[in-house]
Image (cartoon, rainbow, N blue to C red):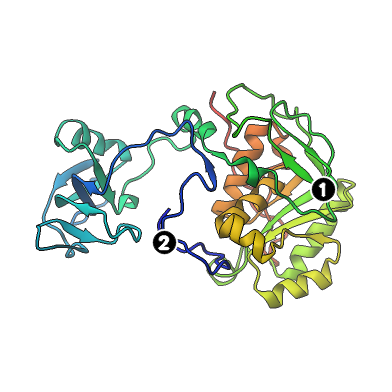
Amino acid sequence: IGTVPHPRRRWPGRRRGLPWSLPHCLPRSPESGGPFIDQVYVLQSYAEGWRPGTWEEKVDARPCIAPPLYTQDKHEYYRGWFWGYEETRGLNVSCLSVQGSASIIAPVLLRNTSARSVMLDRAENLLHDHYGGKEYWDVRPSMAFERHLASASPSEGLTCVPSASPALHLDAGTARRPASACLVLLCQVKLGSSRGGPYLGVHLRRKDFIWGHREDVPSLEGAVRKIRSLMEQHGLQQVFVATDAAPAEHELLRRLLPEMVRFEPTWGELELYKDGGVAIIDQWVCAHARFFIGTSVSTFSFRIHEEREILGLDPRTTYNRFCGDQEAACEQPTHWKVAY
């Protein structure tokens, strides 16, 4: 793992060269490569843009619109930002203008290059072909967390009971995987076959969402009103909150919702789990709640939706989000079904 900082960075230690096996279970993920990348393609839009009504999917080798952030060293290797790995070098760098879905790049990779290793820089210029389709869900089960992360949860204040999920269960406040090193769920699970632990799971996004999505994000007072309403509606006495709230907001939230449970790691746990691992623990606990409510357009809430869908929890208890304070009602998240 490179040095891209986690958005909730708290751990002050080393962030460069952390193995992917730290947060993820990798027996099903093959290894390849080395310090050299045969071909770096920098993806960009077309300089001339496109006229309304004339959209077409295309890819062409073009001169770089902006100077690439790579320079050649004395050995004519390309040096640049490879996630903090100074030993990584590119052998060739060129620009591709792209317009369309990710599949348009396949012919380039399969027929138009002899490179054995390719890096696509600025790949966000491509669009999804079929997000959430069968290919996605065929891959998704291999994206399993390490058992030591799945086994960690708040040790006090949160009581869980066995879940009906055939793959795992909650017991005495701990989310536990089977004896194997990682969980790969390959069988189809009937939605509604799992109930989750008897607590409300909440993902309350703050920070940049307060101003970037102010119409969709409630005040802390508004969020607590909704939380209490859901707890009463579903007969729940406990609530787990995953949030990136600033310390002052966290203190206010604690005063407004004293029964709230959070995973607040010690320095020793931060050193063990790192910032990303703490986020995984939050995700894991929210995924096993009896009822979950998240934040509009938050990627973290989306990942919790996926976990709950795989576990077979009722979609009505999963695809829920907070409304803004000025909204009497709001559009709820789309139900992304597992494609077996």
Residue at the disc numbered 2: 3
- Count of marks, rendered view: 2
Q: Residues within 10 Å of mark 1 (few under 14, many from 20)?
A: many
290 left or right of 236?
left
- Would you place residue 153 above or below residue 270 in this image? above
Asked if residue 171 can be seen in this view, the reply is yes
Q: Return the residue nearer the eye: 117 or 27.
A: 27
Residue 264: x percent and y percent?
Answer: 71, 63
Residue 72: x percent and y percent?
Answer: 13, 61
Residue at the disc numbered 1: 199
249 left or right of 109?
right
Q: Considering the numbered disc 1 on the image, is that residue within a helix, a strand or a loop?
A: strand
Residue 272: x percent and y percent?
Answer: 60, 56
Residue 316: x percent and y percent?
Answer: 72, 39
Amino acid type at circle 1 is: Tyr
Amino acid type at circle 2 is: Thr
